[in-house]
């Protein structure tokens, strides 16, 4: 069976043609090691974000920079906190690095209570927008958290920032305790290339570079580096795709609500939805039987929900029609 894959928040669109062209040109030079400084790509990212070269570190997916941040800034004396419902890898990275962590419960409506993080005096990891809830904090709220914890690092994971949110990159030169991470995996259609980056003050980036050079100096392969440069030169393509995904998200959300689904206010490339009569696991299973993969979590607070990636409009129409069949008469 050919599945419609709406379970890992990939983009339904191919990478930009420039990214594809540069990557295939780089293929003919694979006998050489890649540039360990990743200079040209770092320069392009810095340019596009309006920061300096020294503010940016490029990594193998944003997972790598997140792991680097746990390694560089946290230990037994410097524990960390993050919401109890968030990106699953935070607890994995904390555990693998033997870092004590606390999970702060979300409110019942899945929003983050900012007051919980004010002056908490521990390193903080927040996905903004959060995953899998899709809900974002305003930039002013992020700033309050960063400002109130000057002796700790605040990492803002912006994997989904491009789907209708304000980035905290504008704050990195104002606060030396802020690290913002982003990825090429979602809005830039390059999950398979493994490319992400962090933006922070020079000193933070220098610390993270120390980790990089002592673990994997050639962390970005030549083809990925070239594709990343192509994507950075083609930001208009990314923006167009984001607009399309946002439009499809809003249409799909409205259709799901008509069928008795409750949704969070997602500003990402996915929806987080529960039905008022049918359990989350049953929806997941029935969709799977019909060839549509979505993501279900067993965790009790969110087991009524499914996370549904926004695909093409055609994919989402098939999802909507299938859900109509599943929910009919319930
Ligand atoms: N942060 C969040 C919140 C994510 O959902 C993901 C991907 N699933 C990542 C980071 C990591 O993405 P990547 O390593 O592909 O950049």
Image: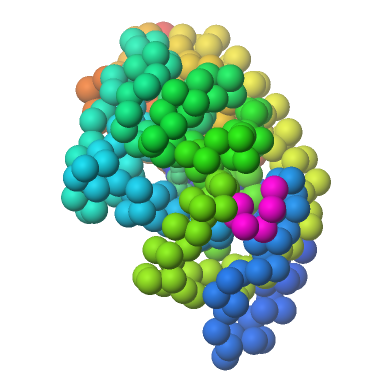
Q: Residue at x 42, y 17 (%)?
A: 114
Q: Nearer the viewer, residue 82 or 319?
A: 82
**From what the image shows, is residue 170 above or below residue 27?**
above
Tell whether 192 sits left or right of 241: left
Front in this rendered view, residue 37 or 186: 37
Q: Which contiguous range is marked in magenta?
A: 51-56
Q: Is residue 4 left or right of residue 85?
A: right
In the image, residue 217 lies at what x, y percent? 46, 73
The answer to whether residue 1 of the structure is visible from this angle is no
Q: Classify 135 as above or below 80.
A: above
Quick check: can you spot residue 171? Answer: yes
Q: Quadrant of residue 312?
A: top right
Residue 43 sits above or below residue 246 on the image: below
Residue 64 spot, x, y in % from top left: 42, 57
Query: x, y percentage for residue 152?
Result: 38, 36
Q: Position of residue 311 (x, y in %)?
A: 59, 39
Towards the viewer: 126 or 149 = 149
The answer to whether residue 111 is magenta is: no
């Amino acid at each position: 069976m050919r599945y419609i894959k709406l379970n890992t928040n990939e983009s339904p669109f191919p990478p930009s043609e420039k990214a594809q062209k540069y990557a295939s040109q780089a293929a003919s030079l694979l006998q050489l090691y890649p540039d360990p400084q990743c200079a040209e790509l770092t320069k392009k990212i810095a340019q596009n974000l309006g920061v300096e070269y020294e503010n940016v570190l490029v990594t193998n997916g944003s997972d790598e920079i997140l792991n680097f941040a746990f390694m560089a800034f946290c230990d037994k004396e410097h524990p960390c906190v993050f919401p109890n419902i968030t990106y699953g890898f935070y607890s994995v990275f904390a555990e693998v690095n033997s870092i004590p962590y606390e999970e702060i419960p979300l409110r019942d409506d899945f929003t983050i209570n900012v007051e919980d993080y004010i002056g908490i005096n521990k390193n903080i990891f927040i996905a903004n927008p959060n995953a899998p809830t899709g809900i974002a904090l305003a930039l002013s709220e992020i700033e309050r958290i960063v400002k109130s914890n000057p002796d700790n690092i605040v990492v803002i994971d912006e994997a989904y920032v491009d789907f209708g949110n304000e980035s905290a990159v504008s704050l990195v030169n104002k606060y030396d305790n802020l690290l913002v991470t982003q990825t090429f995996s979602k809005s830039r259609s390059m999950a398979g290339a493994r490319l992400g980056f962090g933006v922070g003050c020079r000193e933070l980036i220098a610390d993270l570079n120390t980790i990089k050079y002592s673990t994997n100096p050639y962390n970005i392969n030549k083809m990925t580096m070239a594709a990343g440069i192509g994507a950075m030169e083609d930001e208009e393509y990314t923006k167009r795709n984001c607009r399309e995904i946002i439009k499809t998200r809003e249409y799909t959300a409205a259709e799901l609500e008509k069928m008795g689904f409750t949704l969070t206010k997602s500003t990402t490339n996915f929806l987080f939805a529960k039905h008022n009569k049918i359990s989350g696991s049953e929806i997941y299973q029935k969709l799977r039987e019909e060839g549509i993969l979505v993501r279900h979590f067993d965790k009790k607070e969110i087991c009524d929900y499914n996370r549904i990636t926004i695909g093409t409009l055609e994919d989402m129409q098939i999802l909507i029609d299938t859900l109509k069949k599943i929910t009919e008469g319930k």
